[in-house]
Amino acid sequence: MTGARRTGRAAWPAVPATAADRVWIDRALRLARNAARAGEVPIGAVVVRAGQVLGSGRNRTIAARDPTAHAEIVALRRAGRAAANHRIGGATLYVTLEPCLMCLGAMVHARIDRLVYGAPDPKVRAVRRLRRAGRAGLNHRFAVTAGVRQAECARLLQEFFRGRRPARPAAVSPAGSGRSAPGW
Ligand SMILES: [Zn+2]
């Protein structure tokens, strides 16, 4: 196991939330509510560097007919364009729900500094799994802060999956859409 600690850094260090984190997660929550109004699973994301928004987005997989159009991917693409660079070092990605493996992979490729998320995903648990597998040979790691505005982020998703959100388009079929409610 000699390679395990070759970077000399703690793997996926957990850092406490700041007041600014709550402000940015609030912005991501507003994007998530926009997604719900559009009939998309309510998840929002914001990429911030030096106190400035580089890119933001919300889940739009249904409208875009794009399985990769998660909020984090949408925000990272916009941030890359804004930064004129496929690498976005020094940035923090804020998202309302614990990211999936695809989005975590994109964050590694983007070289972000830090991830802040709201609600944990109790089924997938991708961040926690990845942190446990912290010696998986990835060439980039970032700090993680979990649970910012957790209750609000989880409630939005709970209400969406219970069908209580307003003005959901009838075209979206809960059955057969492949979207099961996470286990909040
Ligand atoms: Zn994702």
Image (spheres, helix red, strand yellow):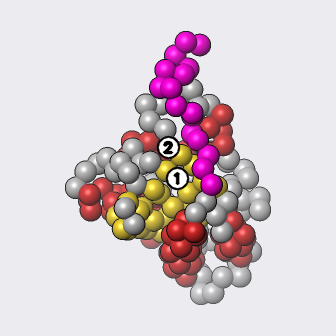
Q: Residues within 10 Å of mark 1 (few under 14, many from 20)?
A: many
Foreground residue among 148 and 61? 148
Query: Which amino acid is tagged 2?
Result: Phe
Q: Secondary structure at mark 1?
A: strand
Name the magenta segment's main secondary structure: loop
Residue at point 41%, 62% (across, down): 48
- Measured as percent of width and height from the top left, residue 3 is found at 52, 16
Which stretch appears magenta? Answer: 1-16
Label 1 belongs to which residue? 115
Contact between labelled residues 2 and 1, with CB atoms less than 8 Å apart: yes
Query: Which amino acid is tagged 1?
Result: Leu
Residue at point 71%, 62% (across, down): 181
Which residue extends farthest right? 184
Which mark, residue 161? Answer: none
Q: Quadrant of the N terminus?
A: top right
- Measured as percent of width and height from the top left, residue 173 is found at 62, 71
Q: Residues within 10 Å of mark 2 (few under 14, many from 20)?
A: some
Q: Quadrant of the C terminus?
A: bottom right
Label 2 belongs to which residue? 142
